[in-house]
Image (spheres, rainbow, N blue to C red):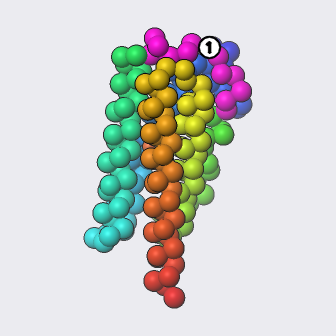
Amino acid sequence: MAGKKVGSVTFQTMTDILRFAIEREEEAARSYAELAQKAGRSGLQTLLLELRAEEVHHKKLLQEVVAGKSAALPGRDVPDLKISDYLIEEPLDAGSHIQDLLIFAARKEAKAAALYARLLSESSAAEHKSLFQFLVQEEKKHKLKLEQEYEQQVLQED
Ligand SMILES: [Fe+2]
Ligand SMILES: [Fe+2]
């Protein structure tokens, strides 16, 4: 597995990228559940739980691609795609303010959108293209909602 090295990690195939995306979706769902708890009963909590449900749905869609139709995916290498391009550091701790957590989550959504845009550009099958197009739009929407929520929170503080 020449493509799987710790340090400068690269993906070997589309299936690798999809597995990585599935892990990111799991992680996103988990962190929205945590954030929702932290938010307490509020409009923000409702939003975060919606986001959580959508990430769970994304994970299922990706799992279907890997389980049923991976043969239809291009098998060629994608050596220039680095995992680190789609991850951001976790500078936050349990004591972080909810506003910081919202901005951090928005940045992760931007990375998710970029990952799906990359998958979109690597795909040739029409059904995969439409799935990745859908996911790009979804993650962009998530980012926007989080940013709007951030602005609201900041305004409420003044
Ligand atoms: Fe997602
Ligand atoms: Fe998302």
Question: Residue flagged by tag 1: what amino acid is it?
Answer: Arg
Q: Quadrant of ligand 1?
A: top left
At x 37%, y 19%, the residue is 67
Q: Tell me if residue 47 comes above or below residue 54 in the rendering.
A: below
Magenta segment includes 81: yes
Q: Position of residue 34 (x, y in %)?
A: 38, 57
Give coordinates of residue 43: x percent, y percent: 32, 70
Taking depth in this image into account, of 157 and 89 the one nearest to the observer is: 157
- How many neighbours does mark 1 have within 10 angstroms: few (below 14), some (14-19), or many (20 or more)? few
Decide whether residue 40 is among the magenta residues.
Answer: no
Residue 51 visible? The answer is yes
Q: What's the magenta bit mostly, secondary-structure-wise? A: loop
Q: Is residue 5 visible?
A: no
* Residue assigned mark 1: 76
Q: Tell me if residue 105 comes above or below residue 10 in the rendering.
A: below
Quarter where residue 55 is shown: top left
Give me the residue at 44% from left, 39% from top: 134
Q: Is residue 23 above or below residue 99?
A: above
